[in-house]
Image (cartoon, grey):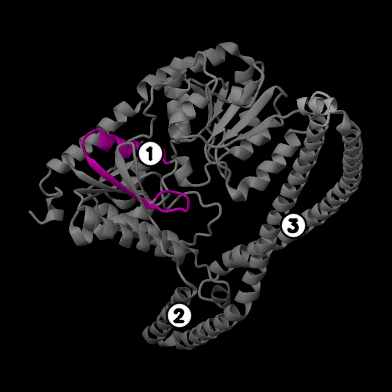
Amino acid sequence: MARVLMLVLNTFENDSRVYRTAKTLSDNGHQVLLVCRYKEGLPRKEEVGGFEVERVELPRITRKELKEIAKKRAELLIKQALSEGQKNPSKRFISICKVGLYKFSYYTWKAINGVLYLPIYLTLSLINLFFRCCGLAERCIGAFIRKSETAMLSVIKARWLIGYLAGSQNPIISFLRGIQPLKSLFWYLRRRSMHFLAMSLRKLKALYWPVRRVILLSIRKVKNCYWFLRRQLLRLRNAIRRVWIVRLRWFSQRLKGTFLSFLFPDYSFEKRKFSYEAFGDLALERAREFVPDIVHAHDFNTLIAAGKIYQEMAVPYIYDSHELWVHRNRPTIVAGDEEREWEARVEKELMIDAAASITVCDSIADFLAKEYGVKRPIVVRNTPDVPPSYLSAEGKTTHLRHRLGLAEDDFVMVYVGRIAANRGVEDILGAMKLLPPQVKFVALGAMAPHFEGVFRRYSLKLNKRTKRVFLHPPVPSDEVSEVLLGCDLSLVTMNQACLSYLFALPNKLFESIHAGLPIVGPDSPEIKRILERYNCGLVYKDRNSADLAKKIETIFKSSSLISELREGSRRAAQDLTWEKEKRVLLDLYSELLEDPSLAGDFARGTV
């Protein structure tokens, strides 16, 4: 059996495909070491599902390194301008002007970057520090109020205890009463002590409540000021980020080689390249220790690492493309033509050198084969590796309807996955306005920071009279199908904002099928093919909330259609299983290990 080094450039917290692949190989006798990215709070090393997981910490790119990148960039542009002038004398004047502009831009950028860097980032740091201090003060005040109330309760209990000790029920008091000489002394002391205690408690109580009222009023005033100031500072911070970091960079990127491109440089591409190279170096160190037979690289961001290992140790590698990386959804990334061209070139070169390629659906496999002129990747769909959840639906209380306390007569629609731009969540929220009040929508997944404001605005409008929109945190991938039990409809939405989303065959489709739910999905080729083949759902026009609402209402009003679509999902669940998909994966590994030209003996120097 083989030693498999698996690479993934995320923290491996909830990556179902990577986990499923590694566990399948481990269960079939292969020794698997998964190298992923480290995040604070997660263990550096652990064993999961029978295979080892090792997290590595990536170094950060420094400002000094960024300055070196800017310097090299300026030198490259100047060199290109001079060579243009030498090749074509008629353009010599233009090339001289370009050289002057580039030099002026670069040195101006250095001056302005040095002057403006400190105040801009110092302002952001002070705002963040203010938020932290306010949060700490709020926690301290809350703790003081809780402790003061506890102290007041303790005083009341002490008063009751002293009253009991001085009361007639105490046997010691009864004994002292029998001693006649001490009787008058006892009553005098009891009267004085009780009077003193009562007066002390009365004064303490009279003092406590006004002080507490003053503190609470002060806290309320401070809180009002705090929230006002917080809102203003958040607006300032967002404005700085939006204008300085995003918009000006976006504008400058479309003016390549000009003054603005140096004044507002976009280093996100350089940082991503730096992280790919850094992960490659760390993965190469682990490979030298582990001495693998095969490297399994998940997605493009680990492909460079696999290429480095192949160049030094001649270990064959498998490229597992989860999506069309070059044409992926990038809602928060300003990706220029330069970055896309670089990614396409590197992906093509390393796919040619790969021992084999895997992807998630036929459309992506066909596109990669045609685009890069390589052998068509093998398709291994990301189907669940658990039995269909609807088979054990009776008596379950873990599903969403119970968790959120929804009524039995509510029609519950669920969306599963990351809640972000271009995921079709806007279409769903727009359709909710056109649907009756008993239709409820649950978004199950992690909220992207850039989409939080959009989701909140829609939710506030829809939840004015009755609560119709719910947000549920993500659950482990092997529990998703079970959690979906009790819902009435699954919304597998994905806007066709990029080729990767057009060809997508998402996990949530298979998880919904395994939950036995009717499905409504967009008219993208892969999703449409599954829904029509198994008759388990309806298709709507992408980015058309009215058409989506129409399809939902059709299912909502027809119990017979619901039964028909549920039956289709159950038929599909019997066919779309990981048991079938993993055979393709295991056959590929067997073929590679049997091929003497690709065997892992290259790594050990025995061939």
Q: Which mark is residue 230?
A: 3
Q: Residues within 10 Å of mark 1 (few under 14, many from 20)?
A: some
Q: What separation in Å lies between label 3 and label 2 (alpha carbons)?
A: 39 Å
Give me the residue at 67% from left, 47% from top.
453
**Residue farthest toward the front in the current orientation of the protein:** 181
Q: Amino acid at mark 1?
A: Arg
Query: Upstream in the sequence, badge 3 or badge 1?
Result: 1
Q: Are marks 1 and 2 in contact (CB under 8 Å)?
A: no
Q: Secondary structure at mark 2?
A: helix
Question: Which residue type does callout 3 highlight?
Answer: Arg
- How far, Cα to Cα, is label 3 from label 1? 41 Å
Indicate the quadrant where residue 428 lies: top right
Q: Which comes sooner in the sequence, label 3 or label 2?
A: 2
Q: Residue 71's mark?
A: 2
Q: Position of residue 224 (x, y in %)?
A: 82, 53
Q: CA distance from mark 1 to mark 2?
A: 41 Å
Name which residue type carries label 2: Lys
